[in-house]
Image: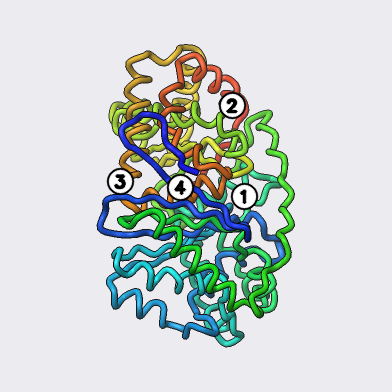
Amino acid sequence: MVVTSAPYEIINQPVVKRLANGLTIIAEQMPTAAVNLNIWLSVGSRVESDAINGMAHFLEHMIFKGTPQLQCGEFERLIEERGAITNAATSQDYTHYYITTAPKDFAKLAPLQVELLLNAHLRDSDFERERPVILEEIRRSEDNPRRRVFQHSMALNFEQLPYRRTVLGPQSVIEQLSVNQMRDFHWRWYQPQNMTAVVVGDLPTEQLIATVEQSFEQAIAHRRQGTLADPLESVPVSAPEAPFTSVSRVNYTDPTLQQARLVISWRVPGLQQLSETYDLDVVASILGQGRTARLVQDLRETRALVNSISTSNITYGEQGVFYISANLSIDQLDAVETAVLEHIQRLHDEPVSEAELSRVQTQVANRYVFGNETSSDRASMYGYYHAMTGDIENALNYPTAIKKVDAATLQNAVRRYLPVDAYGVLRLHPETN
């Protein structure tokens, strides 16, 4: 199947192929001096129980410890010898692994990446050596003020959904995890039917697909005499949490901070309600993305009430968070909260002008275009949308969807999802004498 985008500044022509084993391959030839293979798995901290919180991230580390066919460190050595790049990331909703290679090296390196994912050794000795590395990463994360602020806010916004937990997991859980638990987790989730393999680069599309398909066939042949696991049991989809019905306020004292932190947030739609997110993406840009955004201009540039302020429409799979964050002096907390709500109220009361809306729509759409320029950018975009929504059309149509937002639908979204009398507010205070 060939998918084409709506007319816009870029032309996307990815080919989507679904194999009998459940693997989805997305491939596109792109005139760039590289090939990127980006493999996305629909597994992250969201699918973990509290008892194994942090397992998906821990497993990401362990994947690179070799397989029965590939010695520990051999993959990295071969990658470095050819000047290629590899990395991985784990989030709440997904894990992904990628390599970027020269086109001439792709057929050699792609099978190695797939071999690591499907046939990770997961030896006891490697597991115990890596555990302290994970624990140190948790400690560093806890020492990071920005991460602490974010985690406090997620705990406020999600009372039941697993997004309230950290991706890294707590130290107490990581200390108790066993390698057998990891083997079970890997065997359940690291299956072709839970993967999207996206490959973009300067080789013919048919060659890209064939290389990926052959890489998986070879790796599957190494799995317990070529067997696959039983079909995955789907993780129950949780209902989104109800919007705040009043102002839910939490305060923390953090002696490591030099300035106060203020976060104001609302529970909003996530990717399960994708069409409901576009207006809020535009609202986020109007309020707090870029030097000309309303909150930046007013609170930082004009009134100097904050050192920095930004706005994000965070879209997890099952729910989202509309998130306004500011760094400021402690004596400005009340004034800034009031000022932010005044700006939200203005969006309730006054439609955005056509000129401002057009400018912001162009900014949002251009960020999409600029994030589409390299093979790595494009493969990541395709993989993210397919893993999260099951359809890369949602990636291709994003600029068009943003361009369709009008002042009336935007105002209705603000009135529906951003009430000024019901929201979450987090304040972190530096220690005061």
Would you identify the image quadrant in which residue 330 lies? top left
Query: Helix, strand or loop at disc 4?
Result: strand
Please identify the residue farthest to the front as the structure is shown. 206
Q: How far, Cα to Cα, is label 2 from label 3?
A: 33 Å
Looking at the image, tell me whether mark 2 or mark 3 is earlier in sequence order.
3
Looking at the image, tell me whether mark 1 or mark 2 is earlier in sequence order.
1
Q: Residue at x 60, y 42 (%)?
A: 250
Could you tell me the amino acid type at mark 2? Tyr
Circle 2 packing at 10 Å, graded few (<14), some (14-19), many (20+), is: some
Residue on which the image places disc 1: 163
Looking at the image, tell me whether mark 4 or mark 2 is earlier in sequence order.
4
Please tell me the numbered disc located at residue 398: none
In contact (CB < 8 Å): disc 1 and disc 4: no
Query: Helix, strand or loop at disc 1?
Result: helix
- The residue mark sitting in front, 1 or 4, is 4
Residue on which the image places disc 2: 417
Could you tell me the amino acid type at mark 1? Tyr
Circle 4 packing at 10 Å, graded few (<14), some (14-19), many (20+), is: some
Residue on which the image places disc 4: 15
Looking at the image, tell me whether mark 3 or mark 4 is earlier in sequence order.
4
Q: Residue at x 71, y 59 (%)?
A: 232
Please identify the residue farthest to the bottom as the structure is shown. 125
Residue on which the image places disc 3: 373
